Amino acid sequence: MTDTIFAVSSGQPPAAIAVIRVSGRAAFAVAERLAGNLPSMREARVRRLRAADGALLDSALVLRFPGPATATGEDLVELHCHGGRAVVAAVEAALAQQPGVRRAEPGEFTRRALLHGRIDLAEAEGLADLLEAQTERQRRAAIGAVEGRVSQALRGWMERSATLSAAIEAMLDFAEEDDVPLDEGAVAHVRDGIDALAQEIRAAVAQPPVDRLHDGIRVVLAGPPNSGKSTLLNLLVEREAAIVSPIAGTTRDRIEASVVRAGIAYILTDTAGLAEDTDDVIEAIGITRAQEAMAQADILLWMADAPPPRADALWLHGRADLPGRGAIPAGRRLAVRRDDPASVEAVWRLIAETAARLLPRDDAIGFKRHQQARCLRAADALAAAPRSDPLLMAEELRVARSALADLLGVSATETMLDALFGRFCLGK
C-alpha cells in the first residue's frame, strides 16, 4: 500500500482518449514531474507531459483529486492522453521510471478503495459482477449490489443485532439498577426481537441466488439414442451445434451451446443416448457423462418415451413429425417437430417459465450463494439463542454479527481478496 500505482483505466489502446490513473501518497509529486505546475484540485487543464530528459510525450488533460474523497481513498491523478499505443506506452514508461511507482495489479484500484473504506466487500463483489455482465439481467443485479442494496440490508441487520446486544449487555451489567431490570418480561422482549430478525434474514435469502444469472441456466437434453435430442438442440440454438444422424449413438459426449434470450443466459447441453447396456467403452463413458450432466441440470428436457428420472423434468414428445408420432401421449408437456418452428418456440417458452422460478426477482435483494450461506449462519445463531439465558443470548448475537460482518469485508482474508480482485481488469 506504500507504492504509488498507475494503469490505463479507459480500456486498452488504440482509442481516441486513454485515461491513465495514478493513485498513492506520491501521486501529485509524480504528476508534477511529468506535467509541471498542476491545476487546482478537481479542475481540468491541458498540460504538456515530458519525460525525465525533457522530451515531449503528449499534450494531455490533467485532473487531480485529494484523498480520502476519491475512488481509491488516496490522492489520485488522471492523465487524459491521446489514445495511441505509442503515446500510452511512452507515458507509462515515464511513470514507471520514477521511484516508488509501479504498474497496478488487476483490481488494485478497487482493492485500495475497499481497504480505505470507500466501498465494502459486497459492493466490490457487485462491481466485479458488473464488469463481467453480458446480459441485461446480469447488469441489473450487479448494479443493485454496486449501489449498496446488499450492503444496506447487511448493515441494517447488524445494527439491529447490535441494538439487541446492547439491551442484553445492559441487563447483565446493570441488573441491580431499577431502570434496567433483569426480569423475564425484559428478556422475552429481546428474545422476540431476535426471533423477528432471524425470520427476516431467512425470508430475504430465500430467493434464488444471483449466481445463476452469471453462470447461466443449465438446460440438459437427455434420453435414449435417436430420441431427437441433437435435432432439438440445433433448433433451439438456431445453428448446427450437434451432428444429427439416423445412426444411433452419434452423440458420444456432451455438447454445449450458450444462448441469451430475453436477457437470460442459458447453457444447453446435448448428451449421449442413455442405452440400457453397451459393450462400447467410449459409449459407456458418454452415458456416465450424460448422467452427470442430468444430475447438474437446472432444467432437464426429457426426450424418452419412458417416464423421466426427475419429477421436475420437462417431458417432451420428440420427433413428432415422424409417421405414427403425431399424437402427444399422456404425461408429455409438448410435442416437438423439426418442420414446425412454433413447436420449438413453445419449448423455449416452457424453458423460460421454468427458469423464472430459478432466478431472483428483479425487486429482490441479489444475494450470491456464499452470501446466503453466511446470512443463514447468522439466522441459525439467532435461532439458537436460548429464551431464558441472557449470557448465551449475547454470545449468539455476537456470532450473528460476525457472520454478517464477514460479508462486508470487516474480517476478509488476503487469500479471499486475492481471489476476488484477480477477476478485475487492469486500471479498475
Image: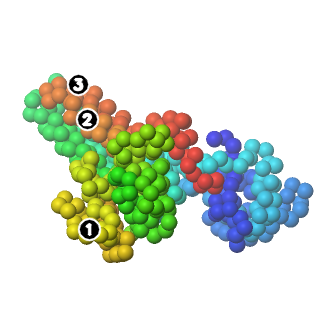
> CA–CA distance between discs 1 and 2?
57 Å
Q: Are marks 2 and 3 in contact (CB under 8 Å)?
A: no
Callout 3 crowding tier (Cα within 10 Å): few <14, some 14–19, many ≥20:
some
> CA–CA distance between discs 2 and 3?
17 Å
Q: Secondary structure at mark 1?
A: loop
What's the amino acid at mark 3? Leu
Look at discs 1 and 2 and give the one toward the viewer: 1
Nearer to us in this view, 240 or 228:
228
* Above/below status of 395 relative to 70: above
**Mark 1 or mark 2: which comes first in sequence?**
1
In what quadrant of the picture does the N terminus appear?
top right
Residue 324: mark: 1
Q: Secondary structure at mark 2?
A: helix
The location of residue 42, given as percent across then percent down, is 62, 64
Residue beneath label 2, please?
380
> CA–CA distance between discs 1 and 3?
74 Å
Callout 1 crowding tier (Cα within 10 Å): few <14, some 14–19, many ≥20:
few
Residue at screen point 69% across, 43% down: 3
